Amino acid sequence: EDQVTQSPEALRLQEGESSSLNCSYTVSGLRGLFWYRQDPGKGPEFLFTLYSAGEEKEKERLKATLTKKESFLHITAPKPEDSATYLCAVKVRSSNTGKLIFGQGTTLQVKP
Amino acid sequence: EAQVTQNPRYLITVTGKKLTVTCSQNMNHEYMSWYRQDPGLGLRQIYYSMNVEVTDKGDVPEGYKVSRKEKRNFPLILESPSPNQTSLYFCASSIDRGTEAFFGQGTRLTVV
């Protein structure tokens, strides 16, 4: 069964304290891995797409990396406005539905 | 501005009263889908559409209907809502089934 697991469930950081969020996946064939940010009561906001192992993408304080089994979202010197839930999702080659299989998310709180 | 627009944002209704949640995208995307988000269960796909007049079931389609008569619109229909359909609903669109999805702001539905 295709599965996505994110850790930790919750993370509290002080402003400026860098850390990483993990997304591990077991799928029949990866079509793509996607990172989203979700603020309370709002829709997921697209951050990155990664398609193959070794690929990296960066945006401001965020950097996403991909291996054959997992992806990391590195947050460098976070600010309070980075507080949100970060969702990882995959699309698999074996599925024609195009559905995103989501992890449960990591809720990040950055304190000033 | 490229966006996915859902209406209404909030809806409280009674069991059995038919309702429609509208979704419209202005990006000329071919692929659209509906998700529901529930605590502890994450985001799950309800229905999807590859193109106009082409729709199919996702993981949790029971109690829902959809239609795709125009490329930009993909309404979600609950013909006889029940309390277990109380949830946060998101419409999403993407260029095709393999690329990143862009989400609407969500519709919080309460069925009493």
Image (spheres, coloured by chain):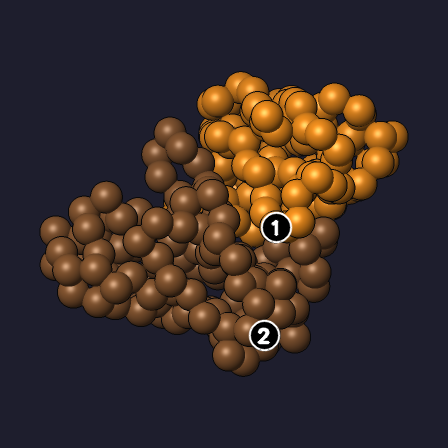
Chain colours: A orange, B brown
Q: What is the chain identity of the residue bearing mark 2?
A: B
Assess disc 2: are there few (<14), some (14-19) or many (≥20) residues with their C-alpha within 10 Å of its C-alpha: some
**SS label for mark 2:** loop
Q: Position of residue A8 (x, y in %)?
A: 53, 19
The residue at the point 66 percent across, 25 percent down is A25
Q: Residue at x 27, y 48 (%)?
A: B85
- Work out whether residue B70 or residue A71 is closer to the camera in this orientation and state it: B70
Name the amino acid type tagged 1.
Thr
A101 or B103, which is in the foreground? Answer: A101
Q: Is residue B65 left or right of residue B102?
A: left
Quadrant into which the N terminus of chain B falls: bottom right
Q: How far across and how far down the image is residue B45, in percent?
A: 48, 47
Q: Which residue is mark 1?
A: A97
Of all residues, the one furthest to the right in this rendering is: A54
Asked if one can make out residue A84 in the rendered structure from this viewpoint, the answer is yes
User: Mark 1 belongs to which subunit?
Assistant: A
What is the distance, in whole Å, between disc 1 and disc 2 at their CAs?
A: 15 Å
Q: Is residue A86 above or below residue B97?
A: above
Residue under the image location 42 percent in, 65 percent down: B66
Q: Residues within 10 Å of mark 1 (few under 14, many from 20)?
A: many
Determine if residue B72 is in view: no
Q: Which mark is residue B52?
A: 2
Q: Residue drawn at (16%, 65%), measured in percent from left and top? A: B17
Vertical arrangement, residue B54 with respect to residue B15, above or below: below
Amino acid of disc 2: Val
Residue B83 at x, y = what percent? 18, 47
**In this rendering, would A33 be left or right of A42?**
right
Number of marks in the rendered image: 2
